[in-house]
Image: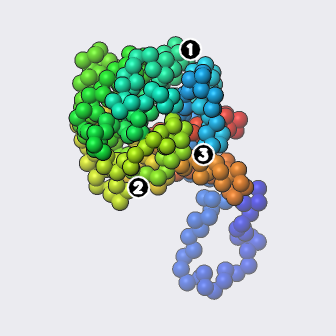
Amino acid sequence: MPDSRHFRPASRRAEAPEALGAYPLIRMRRNRSTQWVRDLVAENRLSVEDLIWPLFVREDSEKEAEIASMPGVRRHTVAEATEAVREAAALGIPAVALFPHVDDALKTPDAREAYNPENLICRAVRTISEAVPDIGIVCDVALDPFNSQGHDGIVRDGEILNDESIEVLCRQAIVQAAAGCDVIAPSDMMDGRIGALRTALDQAGFEHVRICSYAAKYASAFYGPFRDAIGSSGLLVGDKKSYQLDPANSDEAMREVALDLQEGADMIMVKPGMPYLDIIRRVKERFTVPTLAYQVSGEYAMIRCAGQQGWLDGEKAMLESLLAFKRAGADAILTYFALEVARKLKQD
Ligand code: PBG
């Protein structure tokens, strides 16, 4: 272990250099000198129970499985997704998050496919929850996979309509819950949607279905590859700055979290992850509620692609990035690396 040999034991040490004698020398390196002591004093650890695996689902008729901007991630048919989730469950991953790649022909201004009980996501949830009953299933509530303009809400004359969007989002959540979804995760950032969703779910008899609010979701360039994956990047008109948070702000995120908790959120999500570790820390310290971090598609792409180029050690960077979420205070992490990490942790 060459890294443990960087200090010399006292018996073999010559006189301490003059300059070091002026103050008591506190040897911080003692607790870093060998693997066992590093293990002993480690404050945080990454474990498979921390992971949520986001998966993209496609129709059988859709042949395009690869996602150019996310090497190593693919769009699964429902049958493939079921097998993949089976492996995730066997490895001990507690939950998966499903995202649909919807045929362009089904995308409309009113996003009505979002609340079709036979839509791709509902069919996937039904099949997976039946085949793999012990894993948690998280569904995104937002209209972007179904909206012809790629926005998370309903658009009229270039404006994203808040209250009209919420009605559609509630209908979307109900069909997902009815299909067997365990956690409804609204990522749309409309005002008041958590309270409305809670009420709608309760009234429909889904009191047991949890809400994980993407409360602190920033208007980020790091979502680029995800939009390729669900096929909304070519459609998106304008940007999402009128509803997603301004990357310049963190007080605003605290207010969003406070409101979403008041409205009944069970868990809070911060997104993206690595550029927003300060937000995770602030949320966790201030609200002491289950706090999730999303290592988003752009973060995945950066680490994966630099690793593939040999510009950094991809596996080490993957593990370090995820440990950093734990240190910041995240209780769980959504990451496209989840399966790989679970396999790696099992083998170690
Ligand atoms: C959309 C949604 C996005 C992500 C999750 N849900 C993208 C967006 O807001 O445009 C991003 C996830 C990722 O980049 O991995 N409702």
- What residue is drawn where x is 69% and y is 58%? 311
Label 1 C-beta lies within 8 Å of the nearest ligand 1 atom: no
Q: Front-most of 51 and 82?
A: 82
Residue count near mark 3 (Cα–Cα under 10 Å), binned few <14, some 14–19, many ≥20:
some
Name the residue carrying label 3. Answer: 69
- Name which quarter of the figure residue 213 lies in: top left
- As drawn, 102 above or below 261: above
Q: Front-most of 9 and 177?
A: 177
Name the residue carrying label 2. Answer: 278
Q: Front-most of 256 and 50?
A: 256
Q: Secondary structure at mark 3?
A: loop
Amino acid bearing label 3: Ser
What is the spatial separation of the Cα atoms under label 1 and label 2, in whole angstroms? 39 Å
- Name which quarter of the figure residue 212 lies in: top left
- What residue is drawn where x is 23% and y is 35%? 163
Name the residue carrying label 1. Answer: 131
- What residue is drawn where x is 70% and y is 81%? 15
- The earlier-in-sequence mark between 3 and 2 is 3
Please state, as top left, top right, bottom left or bottom right, where the C terminus lies in the image. top right
What is the spatial separation of the Cα atoms under label 3 and label 1, in whole angstroms? 30 Å
Left or right, 161 with respect to 116, comes to left
Amino acid bearing label 2: Asp
